[in-house]
Structures are given as structure tokens and as C-alpha cells.
């Protein structure tokens, strides 16, 4: 049995060194780009080109070939 997330991402953006997520329950989650090597070394334009994928359970940066899951972000796993 696969557990479903209670909340999903409805909006994602880059702002002042932070990736910002607006969740379906209207809470915001933010994390610094410095915790992910690809985001850290990206341009602001690349950082802000975020696609919400998998029904709101994941994020994709096509310019950077990077994907993060909402579960991973909540658990503090931000990729490499």
C-alpha cells in the first residue's frame, strides 16, 4: 500500500535565495538553494523555471535536469 500525501504543491517559485512552495492547505514551505548543488550553481532564471509534477507531489527543473519530491523536501532531503 502506497501512502498518499495529505498536501500537495499548488505553486512553486524562487525568491531571494529560497525555493518557495505554496501547499494545498495554504501553508508555505521554503528552503535555501544552497542545500542543493544544482540549484546553488544555477542562474536565478534557471532556479525560477520550476514545474510541478506528479499531481503536485514533485518538482522538476528541466534546465537543470533536477527533480525533488515533496516528501523528500519535508524530510530534509534536497538532493545532491
Image: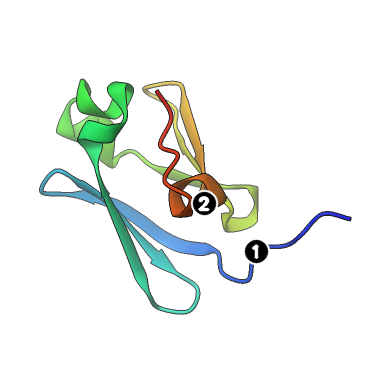
Residue visible at 76% across and 60% down?
A: 3
On the picture, is 6 further left or further right than 20? Answer: right
Residue visible at 20% across and 20% down?
A: 41
Above or below — where is 72 with respect to 12? above
Residue visible at 65% across and 63% down?
A: 5
- Who comes first in sequence, dot 1 or dot 2? 1
Q: Are marks 1 and 2 in contact (CB under 8 Å)?
A: yes
On the picture, is 5 further left or further right than 9? Answer: right
Above or below — where is 77 with respect to 27? above
> Residue placed farthest to the bottom in the image?
25
Rendered image quadrant of residue 40: top left
Rendered image quadrant of residue 17: top left
Q: Position of residue 48 (x, y in %)?
A: 27, 41
Residue located beneath label 2 in the image: 70
Residue located beneath label 1 in the image: 5
In terms of secondary structure, where does tag 1 sit?
Answer: loop
Disc assigned to residue 36: none
Residue visible at 51% across and 51% down?
A: 70
Above or below — where is 72 with respect to 20? above
> Residue placed farthest to the right in the image?
1
Q: Position of residue 25 (x, y in %)?
A: 48, 79
Q: Position of residue 56 (x, y in %)?
A: 57, 56
Instruction: State the quadrant of the C terminus.
Output: top left
Amino acid at each position: 500500500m502506497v501512502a498518499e500525501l495529505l498536501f500537495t504543491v499548488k505553486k512553486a517559485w524562487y525568491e531571494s535565495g529560497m525555493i518557495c512552495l505554496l501547499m494545498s492547505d495554504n501553508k508555505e514551505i521554503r528552503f535555501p538553494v544552497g542545500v542543493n548543488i544544482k540549484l546553488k550553481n544555477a542562474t536565478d532564471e534557471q532556479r525560477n523555471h520550476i514545474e510541478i509534477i506528479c499531481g503536485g507531489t514533485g518538482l522538476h527543473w528541466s534546465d537543470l535536469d533536477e527533480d525533488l519530491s515533496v516528501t523528500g523536501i519535508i524530510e530534509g532531503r534536497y538532493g545532491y
